[in-house]
Amino acid sequence: MKRTINCKGKVIDLEIPKIMGILNITPDSFYDKSRAQSDENILIGVQSMIDDGAAFIDIGAYSSRPGAPFVSESEEQKRLFPALELILKAFPDALISIDTFRSSIASDAIKMGASIINDISGGDMDEGMFDLIAQENIPYIMMHKRGTPETMSSLNRYKDLIPDIITELQEKITRLHEKGAFDIIVDPGLGFAKDTAQNYEIIKNIKSFEILGHPLLIGASRKSMVYKVLECDSNEALNGSTVIHTASLLNGASILRVHDVKEAVEAVKITNLLKK
């Protein structure tokens, strides 16, 4: 299974799992402490995540929480590009992931210096995305989902959950390979057209996704699959998130996308000892 990605000429070894810190340039992401609206808060947030050990910073300007409203392309640009420019000026060596499903946004972000594209739609919401990824030869996080943030909650009926997700992802991976793109990271899309029980079924079966031949990213941080089980809210879901992160690492995850970098880095250190 492929365990490296090439970010701007730098080969990243994922044999030791890496942490991706979340920075939302949005007013409505589900975890309010991940939102950064001012230049000062953006820079403080990025500095903190780098200091805590994040290998990547994932910037999103369009909330994908269930039921999130539509955001126009112009509004996404208005939110994202000034923040990206600010971050890369202050942290020129930072590896920045752009959370977008729009190929035009992704293209401009790559020109500005972004290192990874994180597409929650896996190419479904913009036909030009796969061509762009192949053309730019940039790592691509392909997430599994169905529908849109407005509709996905009603689209969680599967004949056989894990095989169905793997089949749907494999079809897209094959298309990308045919176009010449091979730096692919697979995200099974916890919470995206999956209910709580299905989310935990995915965590238990992470090793099944190794058949796809690409590193696996898990994004469970502070999601409802944690706080609903614990009967709390996202602000109180750190401990539960760390439990899921630990299970994910032990089962073979290569990247964790998280709100709390320090705790996730500690989980990597401990699980590496356990795996030895």
Image (cartoon, rainbow, N blue to C red):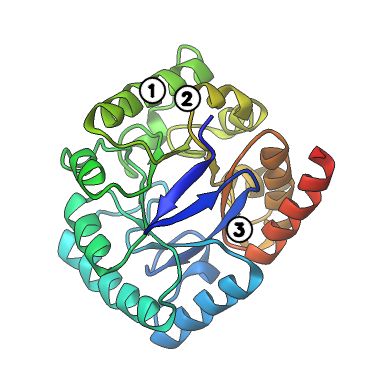
Above or below, 146 against 160 in this view is: below
Q: CA distance from mark 3 to mark 2?
A: 32 Å
Q: What amino acid is labelled 2 in the image?
A: Leu
Given residues 205 and 228, the one toward you in this image is 205
Between disc 1 and disc 3, the foreground one is: 1
* Mark positioned earlier in the residue sequence (1 or 2): 1
Q: What residue is pinned by disc 2?
A: 212
Secondary structure under tag 1 reads: helix
Q: Is residue 122 left or right of residue 159?
A: left
Q: Going 54% across and 47% down the picture, which residue do you hit?
A: 219
Neighbour tally class for label 3: few under 14, some 14-19, many 20 plus, Cα within 10 Å:
some
Q: What residue is pinned by disc 1?
A: 170
Report the quarter where the N terminus lies. top right
Q: Is residue 67 left or right of residue 242?
A: left
Q: What amino acid is labelled 3 in the image?
A: Ser
Q: What residue is pinned by disc 3?
A: 234
Please state the horizontal and vertical placement of residue 184, each as a whole percent of the image. Answer: 40, 39
